[in-house]
Image (cartoon, coloured by chain):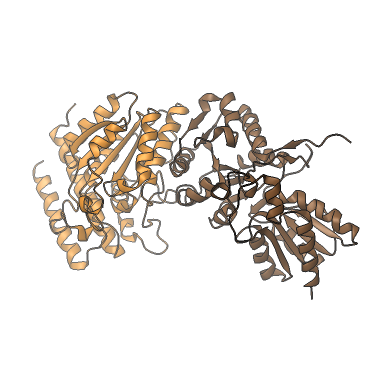
Chain colours: A brown, B orange
Amino acid sequence: MADVVKMATREAYGKALVEAGKQNPDFVVLDADLAAATKTGTFKKEFPNRFYDCGIAEGNMMSIAAGIAATGKRVFASTFAMFAAGRAFEQVRNSIGYPHLPVIIGATHAGISVGEDGATHQCCEDIALMRTIPGMTIINPADATEAKAAVFAALELDGPCYIRFGRLALPVIFGEDYHFEVGKGVSLKDGSDVTVISTGLMVHEALKAQELLEKEGISLRVINIHTVKPLDREIVIKAAKETGAIVTAEEHSIIGGLGSAVAEVTSEECPVPVVRVGVMDTFGKSGPANDLLDLFHLRAPDIADAAKRAMKAKK
Amino acid sequence: MNLDNAEKLSLQKIACKVRMGVITGTHSAKSGHPGGSLSIADILTYLYFKEMNIDPKDPKKADRDRFVLSKGHAAPALYSVLAQRGYFDVSELETLRHIGARLQGHPDMKHIPGVDMSSGSLGQGISAACGMALSSKHFNSGFRVYTMVGDGESEEGQVWEAAMFAAAKKLDNLVCFLDYNGLQIDGTVEEVNNPAPFDEKFRAFGWNVITINGHDFDEIEKALQSARETKDRPTAIIANTVKGKGVSYMENQVSWHGAAPNDEQAETALEELRAELSALEGKE
């Protein structure tokens, strides 16, 4: 068997920016003194004149991005998720969201897999925050292939887009022929007993959970939601109707993220048990990323346990 | 180049009509911010009638000059000057802040012709103006960008983040007016958090700084000329103004920051402005 290629989605973001930049001269990239970490530095190296460092002033950067977009040009604005969605929330809402300007926010270092930097830098509430902004598209790629597809797809949108990238290197699970469409969930494994609806890094764990449960004779459907907003309601409703129980899995707070989004749809359209796997309303901690994923119960066995609980709760 | 008398008179008359629109709008809305709208009426009149390369018939023209009202609560003045300039009918000012109206409480670029940027949350407009000026330079679009910041607004840290950025990126196509009327909601700017001195602050950030009387068209013109001639640095024009300018009972009264005139007060204000307009017409 060939070695599994591993790449962080932030790495794929930097490469995709370069590739997109070669095809499209009509965008610039902004960063807030984190180009080396967000990987916009890859773009800066290739196109030094199309990269603008805004310094450590994220709110200002978001409004600057809005101004650029208001002139009919495209722009990426990058920093860590904590500062993009957190510190600059109100600039994103009022400068970008309210006028529905097509700014692409490339937010890296999302979730607890940031690792050693610890709680101040581990943003587990960005999806929740961004979901509240009308017209905001939120994409959370699961691997390098999706990350690249998201960058190209975002350039075609006519409104704002928040793309969530991670620091941790992950196996590339989708091939070059992978079909990516904004707003469309992807059914990765069919199953009939229970469904896991996963996003980002947790798609990998969901696929492993499917194997674990298969050994126990439980048929787990695995869905990948790369676009958390607008959510693919149809795929959620179909899963609720056909499997009768749902687990959500995300490297994000269980409050306000994918789990909430799914529960909102099912409770209105087809009430079934929904068990949320995610960061349990707590702050992160320092440590190696993989140890943190264990510590915060964001692993395949945690999803498998949750799936069994969801099944038990079926009427 | 100095303004000739006829030109100055013409601008003064337009500014007077712009002020009438501020009164009509806020009176009809029964809310809004007349004080800080009246203080910037002369500068907006000059920008929209003399300075900016714009075409009301083609409000989205790609290479037009841009204006961002960073102190977005002064929307009544912006709407009034846009109406006078022909972007929409003056009668629409009576729909300000009404249900279903285009004229939102704060500027909305998506629906109001001539509004280049949505604004209202203080500190953000000047940053957006920086983005526009950067875009103009980067893509060689050739347009200039103007913004209006309130004195109270400058208590927002983002104003100074933007000031640092504009100077660092040498945005000499950017002009920032600072409406120094000295009053904000809770009192004088000095009492509230003392953001002055503005000239020294902008200068320290690397800007070309000019202080003017914001109600004097000759001074406005001279300052804008200096801005156009200044290379590699953005220009800050510190405009000493009178809050409520043009309506006697509103002048320098903090209570008129965010209160609308009632029927009687509006009529008094309009009478004063009509008298001023007649006097200006008498000079022709």
- Decide if residue B246 is on the left or right side of residue B123: left
Relative height, residue A39 to residue B75 (above, below): above
Furthest toward the front, the residue is A287
- Decide if residue A148 is on the left or right side of residue B8: right
Residue B254 image offset from top left, x and y in percent: 20, 58
Residue at 67% of width from left, 36% of height from top? A12
Where's the C terminus of chain A, which quadrant? bottom right
Residue B252 image offset from top left, x and y in percent: 16, 54
Image quadrant assignment for residue B114: top left
Residue B110 image offset from top left, x and y in percent: 45, 49
- Decide if residue B280 is on the left or right side of residue A275: left
Where's the N terminus of chain A, which quadrant? top right
Nearest the viewer among A119 and A108 is A119
Whether residue B7 is visible here, answered yes or no, is: no
Nearest the viewer among B39 and B233 is B233
Nearest the viewer among B220 and B15 is B220
Residue A216 image offset from top left, x and y in percent: 89, 61
Nearest the viewer among A14 and B246 is A14
Furthest toward the bottom, the residue is A315
Q: How many marks?
A: 0
Relative height, residue B49 to residue A227 (above, below): above
Image quadrant assignment for residue A268: bottom right
Whether residue B277 is visible here, answered yes or no, is: yes
